[in-house]
Image: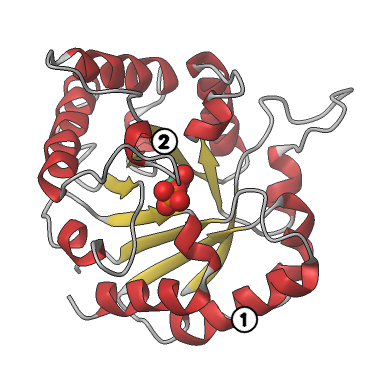
Amino acid sequence: MKQKKLIIGNWKMNPTSLNEAKKIFTNIRRIASKTSKVQTIICPPFVYLNDLQKLVTGPRCVLGSQNIFWQFQGAYTGEISPAMISDLDIKYVILGHSKRRELGETNEEINQKVKLCFKYNLIPIVCVGENKRSGSIKYFDFIKKQLIESLQGISKNQIKKIVVTYEPIWAIGKEAEREATPEEATEMSIFIRKVLSDIFDLKSISQLQVLYGGSVDCQNAEGFLNQQGINGLLLGRVSLISDKFNEVLKIAQNL
Ligand code: PGA
């Protein structure tokens, strides 16, 4: 069976009221619950998860968490345990998003979080991406290091369940230098699969889903989704504008 396209909305620290969050989610759910070829995952701020979970009506449009802590319990002021996320019946967790790495998150911490995900039956969506591209091809080494260190000690069985998202930092957010091209995203998706097949093996990663994220909108979504190695998208800004996000869902459905 053909894999569903994964379309993830990362709301970051938006919107600023629960009411607004409910509105956006309900609008997205209207379309997402009808798109049979798409798995929609909305990742709101933690404080909205419980309330929005009550609005989930089926498996096509579910919630994910934007992060978890690297321990499951204890005296960690302000942190959220993977056990708590799992207890809310939430399955997906974004890890290593560039905005968290910017705040100091390391590959080693991400690695601990990935391992905890498996303990609590959560699916990690591991983000990788380089800051800059220069004339040299050093950024490939950078991505390789992120992958190796973040996924160290993961078993062949576990790697099958991981989602990897390529998000070049230079293409993310309002300050993006430029958009990445579908070809650049595909090239990196091939590289990611190559690095992981060298560590694990080809069979273990045959089902691996590699997504692209960074300034995705209704105009460029199809170009990325049409690439063979790209199994879905992660959207930031556009995931807060339900009409536009729904357009992307329809594009993914009608490919
Ligand atoms: P953007 O964000 O779609 O607003 O560029 C993507 C991301 O940071 O995940």
Vertical relation: 224 (above or below) 99? below
Count residues near mark 1 (Cα–Cα under 10 Å), then give few for <14, some for 14-19, many for 20+: some
Q: Please identify the quadrant where the C terminus is shown.
A: bottom left
Residue under the point 31% across and 37% down? 177
Give, as a three-letter code, the residue at label 1: Thr
Vertical relation: 16 (above or below) 134? below
Q: CA distance from mark 1 to mark 2?
A: 27 Å
Front residue of 45/171: it is 171
Q: Is residue 57 left or right of residue 2?
A: right
The reply to whether residue 96 is visible in this rendering is no
Residue under the point 40% across and 23% down? 151
Vertical relation: 237 (above or below) 252? above
Which color mode does the image show? secondary structure
Q: Is residue 51 left or right of residue 91?
A: right
Front residue of 41/102: it is 102
Percent x, y for residue 121? 57, 46
Q: Is residue 200 left or right of residue 83?
A: left
Count residues near mark 2 (Cα–Cα under 10 Å), then give few for <14, some for 14-19, many for 20+: many
| Residue that label 1 marks | 26
Q: Is mark 2 within 8 Å of ligand 1?
A: yes
Residue under the point 21% across and 51% down? 230
Give, as a three-letter code, the residue at label 2: Cys
Which element carries disc 1, helix, strand or loop? helix
Q: Is residue 39 left or right of residue 57?
A: left
Does the residue at mark 1 contact the one at mark 2 (Cβ under 8 Å)? no
| Residue that label 2 marks | 127
Percent x, y for residue 140? 20, 19
